[in-house]
Structure formats: structure tokens, C-alpha cells
Image (tube, rainbow, N blue to C red):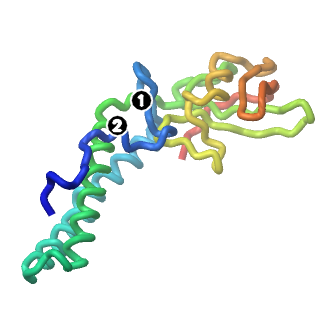
Amino acid sequence: MSKAFVRESDGDEEELEPSLKLPAGVRNYITPAGHARLKNELEHLVKRERPQVVEVVAWAASNGDRSENGDYIYGKRRLREIDRRIRFLTKRLDIAEVVDPLRQGNNDQVFFGARVTVADGDGSENTYTIVGVDEADASRGRISWVSPLARALIKAREGDTIRFQSPVGIRELDIVEVAYLPVD
């Protein structure tokens, strides 16, 4: 099929889910562990996965008719996905600013990399670690530093009460503890 009939975009940002897009003018802060994970993924894609897929596509192309050749068709599609991810990772790593939470020392104020324990009105406690956009994982208590909760927590201190807009309305949380520990 001619490329004239296939809609393919080189722009990575339009294809990202909203949670992965960086707001305009915002720096891409990341922890050392998150930076290492992105570099390892990029290296794996470039040195292992892409060469294997290229080999399969080359073999499939040598078999002749490509129009009904599943290995060729799906291999080419996988190559596009890999190349898109490589471009995304390269751009993110180029603009990444590595911030080590351990350099904050014994600080009771919340900044990037802080592990914050908060209590709501009924006394239940939750612990969150403020990390980069590419490291956020709510199931592990890691929230992006651009999220509404993290924005409300930034610069607050132990003992402060913060207010922020959540999906269920305005919430108030008391900051119980602030610690700076390595993020794994």
C-alpha cells in the first residue's frame, strides 16, 4: 500500500495519553532511578528488540509476496511502534533534569522526590512519593509532580493542612511526615 494512503504522524506528543504529556513550559524532572529505567528501556529497544524485528521483516520480505505475509505486515507495524517509542524516549531523556531526593537532606518541607504521609479528616493515612511524569504510578503511591495533589503539597511542611481540588471535590489533608528516601 502506498504511503499516500496511510495516515502516519511523526509527532509523538499528539499520540500520547494525556497523563504522559508535559504541560507547556514545564521541566521534565526525574529521579535517578527513573532516569536509569528510561535509559535501560531505550538501550533494550535499540540493541535487542529492534534488530530482532528487523531480522524477521527481512526474512519475511525475502519470501516474496508481501501483501499477505503476516510476518512482514506485523513486523513492519512493530518496527513503527518501536521507532516511535525510541523517538519518545530519546526526546524525554534529552530534556530530563535528574533530581536526587537524597540531596534534600533532613528537610521537613515538601519538594520533588519527597515521600509524604498525609491523613484525611477520618484519620486514614496514605503515603505518596512525588516523582516525574514518566515515573508516576498510583498503585505504588507515586504521583507526578504536576498532579493537583503534588502541586498542593509542594512547599508545605510537616503539620500543615493543604486543600486541593480532587475529582470528588475540594479535599483537605494534614501532612503527617515528610521524608527523603531513595526511589527504587
User: For this rendering, which residue is in front, 177 or 83?
Assistant: 83
Q: Residues within 10 Å of mark 1 (few under 14, many from 20)?
A: some
Q: Position of residue 122 (x, y in %)?
A: 92, 35
Q: Residue at x 45, y 26 (%)?
A: 23
Screen quadrant of the N terminus: bottom left
Check residue 92 in the rendering and tell me which mark sits there, or answer none: 2
Q: Position of residue 43 (x, y in %)?
A: 28, 54
Q: Position of residue 92 (x, y in %)?
A: 34, 37
Q: Position of residue 31 (x, y in %)?
A: 47, 36
Rounded to the nearest angstrom, the CA distance separating label 1 from label 2 is 7 Å
Given the image, on which type of amino acid does mark 1 rest?
Asn
Drawn side of residue 9 relative to residue 148, left or right: left
Check residue 134 in the rendering and tell me which mark sits there, or answer none: none
Q: Residue at x 15, y 78 (%)?
A: 60
**As displayed, is residue 150 above or below residue 125?**
above
**As displayed, is residue 182 above or below residue 155?**
below
Q: Are discs 1 and 2 less than 8 Å apart at CB?
A: yes
User: For this rendering, which residue is in front, 63 or 105?
Assistant: 63
Drawn side of residue 141 relative to residue 15, left or right: right
